[in-house]
Amino acid sequence: MDLLIVFLFSYLSGSIPFGLILTKVFVKQDIRNIGSGNIGATNVLRTGNKFLAALTLALDILKGYIPVIISYQYFPEQIQLSCLLVFLGHIFPVWLKFKGGKGVATYLGILFALSIQLSLLFIFTWLVVSLIFKYSSVSSMFASLTVFIIHTVREIAGPIFEIMSGQKSKTYEVDLHISLLLFIFFILIIFTHRKNIFNLRNKTEHKIKI
């Protein structure tokens, strides 16, 4: 029963298409017919409404954060499943024939629920890479890779130092499960940015306007 509850509220929370809902209500347009057709905040910004774009970003982050926090409090043994289903709900929403967003904002919300340090690392890396290369897609992919690598190195190195000092890590196995989850997220983010990768190769990717 716990598994079913986590499955339903995590996936359904992640599948709420806030970008589509907000643009239809306030702009009277279908975001899927604008720009890249994506339902995320970046494409909402192409409507010219910065407030709606910011609101979409905030809500997409929250829909990643809230279900995972609930799982952490009431179903801690299902935390990894909740994280994955929230993310899958965003990129494969049942309401939109499984054609959703790229998942970056929702991924950030999941990170905030798992670790404030990892979420800040993602934001910092994203900002630095975006300032250097001016591509949102490159920033997202590189930042998600950085989070995975840094977390994995830290969690492998930590127990080694504890063993060398005569201590035994009690969180080693669980943290490696999180590393696996972060790796899956990285692969999924690469998948959702496959068109951007194609555009980068053909030098047709749009740069961030700062």
Image (cartoon, rainbow, N blue to C red):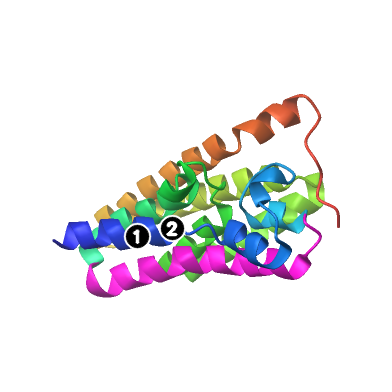
- Tell whether 208 sits left or right of 84: right
- Part of the protein shown in magenta: 47-75
Residue found at the very far left of the displayed protein: 1
Q: Does the image show residue 160?
A: no
Query: What kind of secondary structure does the magenta stretch mostly adopt?
Result: helix
Find disc 2 in the rendering and name its residue.
Answer: 14
Residue found at the very far right of the displayed protein: 210
* Magenta highlight on residue 122: no
Q: Position of residue 23 (x, y in %)?
A: 67, 61
Label drawn at residue 205 = none
Residue found at the very far top of the displayed protein: 202
Total marks in image: 2
Q: Amino acid at mark 1?
A: Ser
Q: Does the image show residue 93?
A: yes
Q: Residue at x 69, y 44 (%)?
A: 33
- Which of the 4 quarters of the picture holds residue 45? bottom right
Q: Residue at x 53, y 42 (%)?
A: 189
What secondary structure is found at the residue carrying circle 2? Answer: helix
Find disc 1 in the rendering and name its residue.
Answer: 10
Q: Position of residue 100 (x, y in %)?
A: 52, 46
* Magenta highlight on residue 54: yes
Q: Where the C terminus falls, by quadrant?
A: bottom right
Q: Where the N terminus falls, by quadrant?
A: bottom left
In front here: 168 or 56? Answer: 56
What secondary structure is found at the residue carrying circle 1? Answer: helix
Q: CA separation, marks 2 and 1?
A: 6 Å
Q: Position of residue 20 (x, y in %)?
A: 60, 56
Q: Residue at x 77, y 66 (%)?
A: 50
Please say if the residues under marks 2 and 1 sit with CB atoms less than 8 Å apart: yes
Task: In the rendered view, tell whether residue 67 sits above or below residue 163.
Answer: below
